[in-house]
Amino acid sequence: MTSETAIAPESGGKERKVRLNMHDDRLHFLIITIGPVLATLVIASLILLAMGVSPLDYYGYIFQRGVMSPSGVQATLTRMGPLLLIAASLIVCFRAGIWNLGGDAQFILGAVFVAAAGPELVDALPAWLMLLLCLAIGAAAGAVWSLVPAFLRAYQGINEIITTMMMTFLGGSLANVLVKLVFLDPETTVPQTRTLAVPDRLPRLFDTTVSSGVLLGLAAVLIVHFTMNRTAFGLRLRIVGANAKAAVHAGLPVATLTVIVFSISAGLAGLAGAVSVLGQNGNVRADWNPAYTLTIVPLVFLARFNGFATIAFVFLFSVLSIGSESAARRLGVPNYFTLVTMATLLILMAVAEMIDQRRSKGKAV
């Protein structure tokens, strides 16, 4: 027997073992990802039954409105634009080990400044330049609002969860002040900014009502996914997120990278606010806060920070949110039932993560 034939069975066995491990990893990913979703649907169905509502009717209306209806599909895709940008914002910071939970304020402030600037710039600049400038204003507003938590975390080691949540409260209050006093439209009785005319907003896709903001959202998620997984910059951020002390010993500028991550993450959140105004609303009303960030957090974790999985989950959530509005009107289900569903999903995700960690520790032992 030659050395080649002696080695061949051993190498073939290693290849089979690698394939089996990859298969197990994929199966494990599906279980811990899809499992909480299925369990959430079961619990939500039981709650609906307790309310005297048929789960089949409820989810049937959601599917009909969000997937089968042309207008529903267009509304779903349009809503995905800002949601995907927020998801990209969260992926960046979470992969770097930073909890930027101030996305709601960054989103709102980006929306307010864009809503104020758009009507002023529309007559002074070409349409494409006005839109680009407005998108830049939204991103800049979000990034600037993150500087205080960024510097406190980078140079003082202060927990960013506390500071970003405090900045969320301040940002929401500042946005209301701006809408009611500084950027108020005097021609309306409801406190709001001036309304950007529909023809001056982001262009629609293929003669539909779908805003091109969805393309910006898709591009942002894919660029973030590629950057975090395929570039040296993304590797540095992942090292910082895995072990900041080890990153310091490795010579990485942790403080600088922290500020950069905050700026990118908050900039994407502010850009989401800009897309919401330019692609959907056209203005901002006082006390407006869709609270998208805390809603998208469980979806990003459910996707395990994978960009492609995140797009799929955001699409499903958009279908659920658009369809549930129709189902709520027809069946008398409260509008906040979707939030109850998301809260249940978040709890079950935490339980699944705890079980998975215990399983991993048991294998290690």
Image (tube, rainbow, N blue to C red):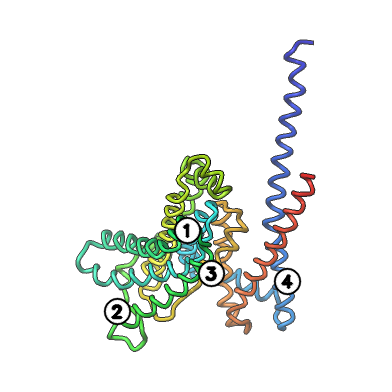
Q: Secondary structure at mark 1?
A: helix
Give the residue at mark 4. 43
Q: Is residue 70 visible?
A: no
Q: Which mark is residue 69?
A: 3
* Amino acid, disc 2: Val
In which image quadrant can residue 175 be found?
A: bottom left
Counting other residues with Cα less than 10 Å from the Cα at mark 3, is it few (<14), some (14-19), or many (20 or more)? few
Residues at marks 4 and 3, CA–CA distance in whole angstroms: 27 Å
Q: Is residue 21 visible?
A: yes
Quarter of the picture holding the C terminus: top right
* Amino acid, disc 3: Ser
Q: Residue at x 70, y 75 (%)?
A: 55
Give the residue at mark 2. 182
Counting other residues with Cα less than 10 Å from the Cα at mark 4, is it few (<14), some (14-19), or many (20 or more)? some
Circles 2 and 4: CB distance less than 8 Å?
no
Give the residue at mark 1. 156
Residues at marks 2 and 4, CA–CA distance in whole angstroms: 46 Å
* Amino acid, disc 1: Gln
Q: Residue at x 33, y 78 (%)?
A: 193
Residues at marks 1 and 3, CA–CA distance in whole angstroms: 52 Å
Q: Nearer the viewer, mark 2 or mark 1?
A: 1
In which image quadrant can residue 303 be found?
A: bottom right
Q: Earlier in the sequence, mark 4 or mark 3?
A: 4
